[in-house]
Structure formats: C-alpha cells, structure tokens
Amino acid sequence: MRLTQCHNFHDFRRLARRRLPGPIFDYIDGAADDETTHRRNSASFEHCDLLPNVLRGVQDVDLSVTIMGQKLALPFYCSPTALQRLFHHEGERAVAAAAASYGTMFGVSSLGTVSLEELRKAHDTPQVYQFYFHRDRGLNRAMMQRAKDAGVEVMMLTVDSITGGNRERDLRTGFSIPFRLTPAGMLQFAIKPMWGIQYVSHEKFRLPQLEEHVDMSGGAMSIGRYFTEMLDPAMNWDDVAEMVRTWNGPFCLKGIMSVEDARRAVDIGCAGIVLSNHGGRQLDGSRSAFDQLAEIVDAVGDRIDVMMDGGIQRGTHILKALSLGAKAVGLGRYYLYPLAAAGRPGVERALGLLRAELVRDMKLMGCTSISQLSRANLRFRPG
C-alpha cells in the first residue's frame, strides 16, 4: 500500500500500522480502559443526518473562520499532540509545515519533540502552545513566559489530564520514554527494522519544552508517570484564572465538557474552550464532545468561541459540528496516522483530502460559507 492509495482516515491508519512498531502504533491508536469513549467519539456523528438544500449557486465556497482572534483558511486545525518524532523523524516540523501550507492553525505540546521557538520562526500561521499544570508553579510561569517570548498567539491549557488515563495497550507493551519494553514489545520493534533505522539515523529524541525542567534520562519516565507524578491534581479555577491574567492574551481550556465548567471559563476571561475527552484516552465512559456540543453552545456560544475535537474522520463530521455551533474542530489521530505513514507528504495529503471533502460537501449542502450552516441543516435520529 502506497501513500497515493490512501483516500481516507482508515487508509492512513492501515498504512501507519504497517510501518510502525506495535507499541508506537498502539500509543497513537489506543485509549483508556475498554476504549468505549474512543469508539463513541466517531459513532456519535452517525445519529445525526445532514439535510441539504439545492439550486443555491455554489460555484465558490469560502471555508475560512476566525477563532480566538485568529483567521484560518479552514474550519479545522491540527491539535497539539505529544511525541510526534516517535511516529516519524520529521515530527512537528512536518505537521506545522502542512498546516501552514493550508493556512490553518497548529499546536505544539509541552511533550512536543521540536521546540516551539523553531516552529514559530519557520511559519507565520497561528500557533497554539498546549501545556499542563505542574506541581511546580514556577515551571508553569516559565512555560508561559517562554511561549510569550516566542510569539505564540494562543495559550491552551489541558484540564482533563491531572492524572494519567489507564491505557492498557501501553501497559502490555511497556511503552515509555525512554523505552522500557516488555519482551512482546521488543519483538514488535524487531520486526519493523526500518523504523529503528530512521530513529537512530536522525537527531536525538528530545522533549525541548521540558528538558530544562524534567530529567527523563535517569530511568524510564512513562507518560503515565509524568501525568501522575508531575502534574498537580490540586489545580482549581483560581489557579487557572491567575494564569489567564498572567498570559493577557487569547487563552483556551481544552477538556471542558460540562455547561457549568464552560460558564466558569467565560467568567475568568477565556477566549475559547475545546470540548474534548482527550480522544477517549482519559475517562472511559465519558460523553462524546459532539453529543455535548449543542448544550454548551446554547449556554455560552454567544460569549466564547466553542470548539471540539474527538472522532473527526470525515468532512461531513466537521459540517455537523459547525452546524451545531462549533467555531472549528481539532484533528488528532486524523493527522497522526498520515504523519506516521509518510511524514509531511502524508499530512499534506490528509489535510488536502479533508479540504476537498469539505468543499464538495458544502456544495452538496447548498452552502457557500461556514456562516450559512445551522441546525436547520440537521436532523437527529434516536440513538
């Protein structure tokens, strides 16, 4: 199977599975506990039907949106995700370049493998810096100041990860940073030697956002241990309100799922919220962001930019979310599989296919701009 034979999310996933060692594929692919929420994220869109209009003159379609003061050419963006250079040696460089080529926003994670400064210098499209709330408050302030100095436009605090999710696929393979694999995990690396050749023949794996603050070389610091030992479960709304004031710019909370929390985000001055269950990787059994979207848009959508992520696999999924009132949607696995499969060309092909789907689907809906989408375009069936 070649990149040119990939036409949708599932094709990219299959190609990534062929090329990655099992433990790394499972890190992308897996979720918490029984992975119920992970499956529900995509399935939730199936209970919603699109109702198109015709004869509306749709020769030109404008997909642009503005979120948190940032103008994007597309209503989707590349959400910040961790450890990208494990999946392909280009890592965040490939994702940032692909996002920039399509005029949309990309995110850099605290657990990113390329520095936010390098990416900010290379691309002038909007950049989000995603970080976690650490027990060390000085570290939190230092991370925000670093992002401010680099010229990052939007600060995004992930609020659903004060402890690590129970990701049993990783436990079975021993996936950790640095690697501390089980025998079964080591066998998976042995049968995919090309990944190892690429890994050792390029620059050393790093976590540049954290390396001055966290020693991950003196033993196996698993991702779960990072969340459990370094992040602060005592984080509360007062802590976040102080961070919003300190940043003094567009500040977004990722992981909001309740109306009560959405209202609190408005009250403390956030510019945006991302409805998210972390791709099903944290609290298994939680509601999907799409199913919760209308309730939160109705409560706060006129006062804050509401976005969502989780389960996006098609342009029609994005149309449904936008019709319910989301200002934009975030992509995660949707671009990670093509990154793993082929680096920058893979991500560019995936984003290009999604844009083409959206243009085609907007024409079939009888809409020429995102602002024309509304709940009048939707009908829900009993689940």
Image (cartoon, rainbow, N blue to C red):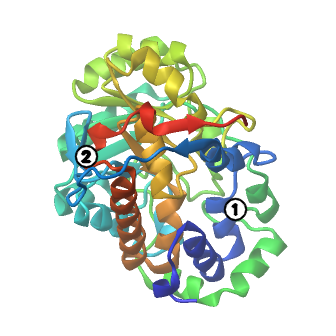
Give the crowd class for mark 1: few <14, some 14-19, many >=20 residues within 10 Å: many
- Residue projecting furthest to the front: 55
Residue 276 is at least partly visible in this image: no
Taking 302 as reference, is 330 left or right? right
Residue topped by disc 1: 175
Q: What label does residue 147 carry, if any? A: none
Q: What amino acid type should be assigned to the residue bearing mark 2?
A: Ser
The residue under the point 58% across, 50% down is 311
Count of numbered circles in the view: 2
- Of residue 4 and residue 269, the one placed in the foreground of this image is 4
Q: Quadrant of the C terminus?
A: top right
Of badges 1 and 2, the one in the foreground is: 2
Which one is nearer the viewer's eye here, 85 or 327? 327
- For the residue labelled by badge 2, is the local secondary structure a helix, a strand or a loop? loop
Q: Residue 233: give x, y in percent of width and height.
A: 60, 24
Q: Is residue 23 above or below residue 82?
A: below
Distance from the alpha carbon under mark 1 to that under mark 2? 44 Å
Place residue 299 in its image quadrant.
top left
- For the point 50% across and 50% down, the residue is 317
Q: Earlier in the sequence, mark 1 or mark 2?
A: 1
At label 1, the amino acid type is Phe
Q: Is residue 165 above or below residue 335?
A: above
Q: Secondary structure at mark 1?
A: loop
Q: Residues within 10 Å of mark 2 (few under 14, many from 20)?
A: some
Disc 2: which residue:
369
Residue drawn at x 55%, y 54% as measured from the top left: 216
Q: Position of residue 175 (x, y in %)?
A: 70, 62
Give how far across and how far down residue 160 sits, in percent. 57, 32
Left or right of residue 365, residue 14 in this image: right
Q: Is residue 318 above or below residue 29?
A: above
